Amino acid sequence: MLASGRTVSSRLLRPTAWLPLRLSSERAAASFAQKELIKKHEQDEPRPLYMDFQATTPMDPRVLDAMLPYQVNYYGNPHSRTHAYGWESESAMETARKQVADLIGADPREIVFTSGATESNNMAIKGVARFYKAKKRHVITTQTEHKCVLDSCRILESEGFDVTYLPVQNNGLLDLELLEASIRTDTSLVSVMTVNNEIGVKQPIKEIGQICRSKGVFFHTDAAQAVGKIPISISDWKIDLMSISGHKIYGPKGVGALYVRRRPRVRLEPIQNGGGQERGLRSGTVPTPLAVGLGAACSIAQEEMEYDHQRVSMLANRLVQKVMSEIPDVIMNGDPEQRYPGCINLSFAYVEGESLLMALKDVALSSGSACTSASLEPSYVLRAIGADEDLAHSSIRFGIGRFTTEEEVDYTAEKCIEQVHRLREMSPLWEMSQEGIDLKSINWTQH
Amino acid sequence: MAAAARSQVMSLYRTMLRESAKFPSYNYRNYALRRVRDAFKANRNVEDPKAVERLMEEGWQTLALIQRQVSIGKMYEAQKTVVD
C-alpha cells in the first residue's frame, strides 16, 4: 500500500511493462518481440510444485517480515559502537543470537554467526583439528557426511592428519561399537551429522555424544537438516560443536551459525581473520538482516516444531503408502524408524532415476543432494549404505515441509505411479524380471 | 471491559481468514488458512481473560503481518503452481 492509501497495480510493476520500444532496426525489433513472446509463453507455464525441502526451503513470511526493517531503514553496522544505528542493529543481532541459542538449549555466548552450515563445518573441523594439532592428529567422521565435511577432512589429510571415514550399516546408522573402537588417544574430533540430507536417517547422537565425552574427544555434529525439526539439546546429547543452516529452516540463504561449547571450553583456530568479531572466531560484519532472519526462523521453528512434525509425518506416510501400494519393487533407503519423516528416498527398480525426474517435470524433486547432482555418479551416500549400483541410479528424494499440502502430495504420488508404470513398460529389464529371470545371474557379454 | 467477547474473537478469526485467502502464493495461502484455523481451534477453551487478551493481541499483530506479506506477494507475483 502506498502512503496515499492506493495500492500499486501489480501489472505496472512487472518488469516488461516498463521497457521502451525505441529500437532503431526492424530486425532488432523483431527479435525483441520474439523474446517478449517467449517470455510471455514462459509466464503462462505453471510452475512445478516444490517437493525438494532438503535442498532449500522457502522463507516463512514471518521471517521475511522480521528481516525487512533491517534491509530498509535499520541498516546500521552492528559493530558500530558510537551511534543509534549501530546500537539498534547490535540489539537485533543479540536478540537473534538468543533465539538461535534457545532452540538448541545453549547460551547465547556460544553461538557464532557464519555464512552457512558449510562455513560452520569448515570452521569446526579445520579449526579444532588445527588448534590441537600438537598432541592430537586424528579425526573421525562417517562416509555419509555432507561434501563440505568430507572435503575439509581431505584437506586435513593433506596437512598430515589421520582421518578415519567410518562406514555405516545398511540402514544408514553408525555402528557405535565401531566408533568406540576407532577412537585413539590422539583423536581430537568426531564429526557425525544428525539427520542425513539424502536419506533422512537420524543418527544415535545421544549415544555418540556419551562415547565421545567419556573418551575426552570433541564431538561435532552437522545439524543443518535437524535443527528446528526435531528437539535438540546440546547438554543432553553432550555436543561440543554444532552447525546450523538458515535456509533449511525457512530462513534466509547466506546465513548459518556454529555452536561452540564454552564449558568445557572448545578452542578453534579461526579460518576467517580480521577485526575479531564473533569472539575472534569469525571476523567480518555480521549481516544483521540475515541474522535477524535466522533468529526469527529458529524462534518460529521452536513454536511450530510439534505441529510441523505431526503434519510432515502424516504427509510422508500418505505419500509412501500411496506409492508403495500401487507400485511393486520400491525400496525406501535408510532406516524406517530412525529417520526424519520429511526426507524420503525411494529407489524404483528397473527405472532410471534421471528419466523419472524428467518425466515428473511438474514436480521439483531431486535424486541425491543438490551439491552433487551435477555429477553423473550415483550418490556416495547410497553407495555407503550398500545400495545396489542400479538401485542407486534409480533413487528419488522426496522432501516434505511446513508448506506442503495434501493436494501436492497426492499429485506427486499419482504422477509418480503413472510415470513409473510408463517407464517400466518400456524397460526390457522389467520385462525380463516379470518373466522370472534373475537379472543378477545374467552374463552380459559384449558383441 | 469484558476481555474479548466471543463476537470479537470470531470477528478477528473471520478477518484473518479473509486476509489469508489473499496470498498470491498457493503454499503460503494454504498454510496461513490452515494455521489460523488450527490456532483458533487449539485455543478455543482458554478461559483466563489475561491469556485471551494476550492471544487476541498476538492475533492482531499476525493479521498486520499477513496484510504486509500479502502486499509483498502481490508486488513480486510469479506464475501459479501446477496444483493451483
Image (cartoon, rainbow, N blue to C red):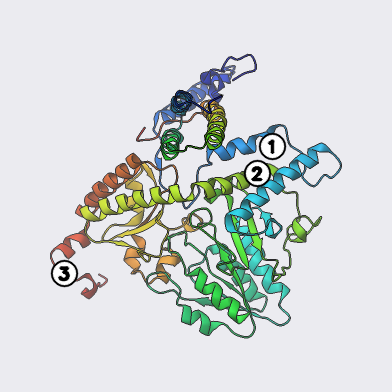
Look at discs 2 and 3 and give the one toward the viewer. 2
Q: Assign a secondary structure to mark 1.
A: helix
Task: Decide which of tag 1 and tag 3 comes sooner along the chain.
Answer: 1
In the depicted structure, whether residue A14 falls above or below residue A78: above
Residue in the picture at 76% in, 40% down: A88
Amino acid marked by disc 2: Val
Q: In the visual, does A443 lie left or right of A158? A: left
Say which quadrant the C terminus of chain A sits in.
bottom left
Are callouts 1 and 3 both on one chain?
Answer: yes
Residue in the picture at 53% in, 45% down: A250
- Contact between marks 1 and 2 (CB within 8 A): the answer is yes
**Residue A251 appears in the picture as rendered:** no
Q: Measure how far apart labels 1 and 2 are at the Cα level.
A: 8 Å
Amino acid marked by disc 1: Tyr
Task: Decide which of tag 2 and tag 3 comes sooner along the chain.
Answer: 2
Q: Nearer the viewer, residue B45 or A38?
A: B45
Q: Measure how far apart labels 1 and 3 are at the Cα level.
A: 65 Å
Q: Label for residue A437? A: 3
Which residue is denoted by mark 1 in the rendering?
A70
